[in-house]
Image: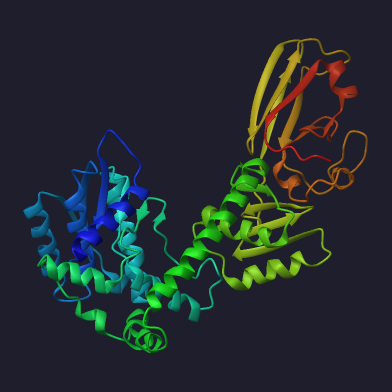
Amino acid sequence: MDNVDLLFRFKSILRSILTNSVCKTRVLLAVSGGVDSVVMLDLFDSVRDEFNLQIGVATLNHKLRKEAQEEVKFVERLCRDRGLDFFTEEADVLQYSKEHKLSIEEAARILRYGFLIDVSDNYCYKYIATAHNSNDLLETMILRLVKGTGPYGLVGMNLVNGRFIRPLLFFKREEIEKYARHKDLPFVTDTSNYDIKYNRNFIRHKVIPLLKEINPSVEDASLKLAKGIWELEKYINSTIQSFNEKHSMKIGEYIVFKLHKDKYLQVEQIRRLALSFFGKPIDSEKIERFKKLQQSDKISYKVLFWKDLGIEVSRGWCIMGKVGKYQHNSKIINIPMNKVVTETVIFNDYFLKISSCGIMKGANDKCLSFEVRNWLEGDKLLSGKKVKEFFVEKKIPTFVKHLIPLVVSVKEGKVVYIPYLYEAKGYLNPLGITIETKGGFYFES
């Protein structure tokens, strides 16, 4: 009956994860040969016809133990007996950890997930299933707690995270092992799982037994906490995503967005966008620096996360990317006299169309030359006003001057056009010159 109940619960979880499809849903299983992953393989194999699944299995040899190659062969035999596609690869985890100054655990995780993603991409698997259970969740929460993580980083894993799914997350290790015994499933035992020099093993064999003396159902308690965090995170994600969809866009190598009016949500907005944009989380020290500047009276400020990568905040707007060193671009456009001509310039996702109607009144030159470029210190409008002062008057964020294209008359040495903000019509119209802009970002003054 225990096995029937576990299978029933597994099906229920799988229904909540998988989308209905006429075509077979391709799922790649990460199987090490241990009891958790073997049980996951058996459960998926049991329901593959019912759920219209096409299953593949992937095993990475970390080359950390002499038994590793035999364990790979064991998984390969399991797949052959069940008629499942099998993928494997070797990785030198020890060497990788030394080269990148990582713990062996972290190096193994990076290489393992990289391998799984590569197989998934190359063979068109929609999902990657890992065999993490509620005990793994508890261990992760304790590990992150002692490292000083924030509330959303405490859980560290979810039932669904992009293409990764964890269908055993609501099962205890005890239930999984019981299922394996009842079905007489063969599996291998990784002896390194008992080596307490690894942080996770120390927590598993030393810390959790002490917690069980306080609460024998500590796994259930941690799962309740995780569910509460998941619900809160879902709400925060939804709120921020909805706001960002209306008030953000990518410009060149940057992302520009309006900061949410709520200061707590600003922090989460930057934390989540940075993770998505840079592919790695911001450390707590940089977050605290942002909070400190956020509470100050400064209108504009920068926070660098790594070298010249970070954010620049100005007048309630934020730019994220290589803010330590903005790239300067320039292009000369020559407009022949008395010819109907249109020139198009793409500049940081601004699309400029400079046209001549072919009648240049008062023009003595054979052609007019314009330079399209970023702002430079000392730039002036045709009227004589400094562009920098003009931006301040219009309450434009300081970083805009590094992104927005200025159209400069080469002959006059002055700015005659700034998208959405300024046009020297008295100069351009008699020359039969029109400039239009599409795209880019429009900042209301």
Residue in the picture at 33% in, 48% down: 15
Residue 224: % across, % down: 46, 69
Quadrant where the C terminus sits is top right
Residue 359 versus residue 344: which sits nearer the camera?
344
Residue 34 visible? The answer is no
Q: Quadrant of residue 209?
A: bottom left
Residue 318: % across, % down: 70, 52
Residue 111: % across, % down: 32, 63
Residue in the picture at 80% in, 39% down: 444
Residue 361 versus residue 390: which sits nearer the camera?
390
Residue 326 versus residue 445: which sits nearer the camera?
445
Decide if residue 129 is on the left or right side of residue 278. left
Q: Is residue 12 above or below residue 280?
A: above
Decide if residue 275 is on the left or right side of residue 438. left
Residue 161: % across, % down: 42, 55
Decide if residue 444 is on the left or right side of residue 309. right
